[in-house]
Image: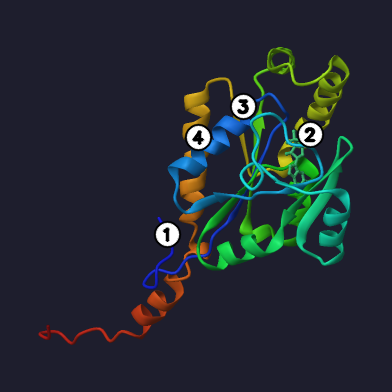
Amino acid sequence: MSSDEARPTRGLMLMVVAPSGVGKTSLTRRLVADHSDLHLSISATTRAPRPGEHDGRDYHFVDRPTFDAMVERGEFLEWAEVYGNRYGSPKIPIMEALSKGQSTLFDIDFQGAMKICGQARQDCVLVYILPPSLAEMHRRLHARSQDSEEVIRERIARAKEEVSNWKTFDYVVMNDDFDRAYAELAHIYHAERRKASRNLWIEPLVEDLLAEAIPEAGEG
Ligand code: 5GP
């Protein structure tokens, strides 16, 4: 589904928030791969690339002065410091996408999602991905062996705080089964794209319908 001249639509900003180690990356990458009208917002960050990460694909990797200059110029929709590094979502590509009927998926933290949605709630869809349990989250974070035990404990404490805010979200999806969680996420996206307020072609069509003369009996 995409915006075309005959059926103009407004895109949406899909915020997918989850604690680390819940499988969010696999879910969101697949959703983007399966939908040509959905693009991932590539954040800028001051953190160093991890093995296998590419500049411009995973993040725009920039140094601190460059990041701060971007903040000064107002180039971010929001930015935040997370675990000692700065992250920001570039504004221009997202605004352009919305008006062209294209959607943007944000893989950002809870605070970032709240900041963006606080400014543009009608364009936002907030989804939280729940881990089946904190024990399972702990196990996955260990298996990934990217973080020290201290960082893992910090991530779990943060997850507990976030989970308690679940009512702020439009949807909550539990990822205990990848295929089911993916199907739920895809259904949410499809339904939100169909929302009347985003389908800008409806209003003129309805106006035409209302202005239409009803044929006299025996005509046409
Ligand atoms: P990581 O360094 O593991 O890739 O990301 C650390 C955290 O920063 C994650 O929770 C990620 O979602 C968040 N993050 C990534 N990009 C942005 C952004 O543009 N803004 C905000 N607020 N958080 C971000």
Q: What is the C-alpha distance between the residues marked 2 and 1? A: 33 Å
Identify which amino acid the numbered label 2 is placed on: Glu
Identify which amino acid the numbered label 3 is placed on: Gly
- Looking at the rendered structure, the number of numbered marks drawn on it comes to 4
Q: Is residue 178 left or right of residue 166?
A: left
Identify which amino acid the numbered label 4 is placed on: Glu
Dot 4 or dot 1: first in sequence order is: 1
Residue hosting label 1 = 2
Dot 2 or dot 1: first in sequence order is: 1
Dot 4 or dot 3: first in sequence order is: 3
Q: For the N terminus, which image quadrant?
A: bottom left
Q: Nearer the viewer, mark 4 or mark 3?
A: 3
Q: Residue at x 55, y 33 (%)?
A: 27
Q: What is the C-alpha distance between the residues marked 4 and 1? A: 21 Å
Task: Tell me, for residue 120, which label it has, or none.
Answer: none
Identify which amino acid the numbered label 1 is placed on: Ser
Residue hosting label 3 = 23
x and y percentages locating residue 145 in the rendered image = 73, 16
Residue hosting label 2 = 162
